[in-house]
Amino acid sequence: MDPSLPPASSNISNEIEVLFGKLKDLPPLDSSCLHEEFAIVSDFTNIVTELQKFESSLTSSQKWKLLSLQMMADILKSEIPFINSSFDHYN
């Protein structure tokens, strides 16, 4: 996604749906998968942050979905100890 241009509404919808799909594909919480989980949640959070830049151009439904995604990102970061303790250092 090019951060200098506001994406088309349909592109935002697609990005949001892709993120919801990624949530379903998260590996189970397992200490052997922490690096993989960390990478997924980091990527997920970065995309949500990019989408938030264009919140003013979103429909009401898209805004609610984006809010849900942000809350999920916050929950994921708090549930995975490795991410919770070192998330800021990874980015």
Image (cartoon, rainbow, N blue to C red):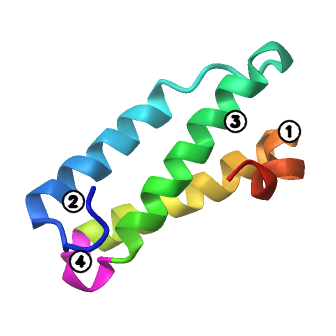
Q: Name the residue under label 2.
A: 12
Disc 4 vs disc 1: Cβ atoms closer than 8 Å? no
Q: Quadrant of residue 34?
A: top right
Q: What residue type is labelled 3?
A: Phe
Residue to which mark 1 is pinned: 82
Q: Give the mark count.
A: 4
Indicate whether 72 appears above or below 27: below
Q: What amino acid type is highlighted by mark number 4?
A: Ser
For residue 80, above or below residue 35 = below
Q: Position of residue 37 (x, y in %)?
A: 67, 30
| Tag 2 secondary structure | helix
Residue 3, by quadrant, is bottom left
Camera-side residue: 23 or 45? Answer: 45
Disc 1 crowd, CA 10 A, few/some/many (<14, 14-19, 20+)? some
- Please give the label number shown on residue 38: 3
Q: Which of marks 4 and 3 is nearer the N terminus?
A: 3
x%, y% of residue 11? 15, 55
- Circles 1, 3 touching at the beta carbon (< 8 Å): yes
User: Is residue 68 visible in the rendered structure shown here?
Assistant: no
Query: Against 91, is 25 above or below?
Result: above
In the picture, which quadrant includes the N terminus?
A: bottom left
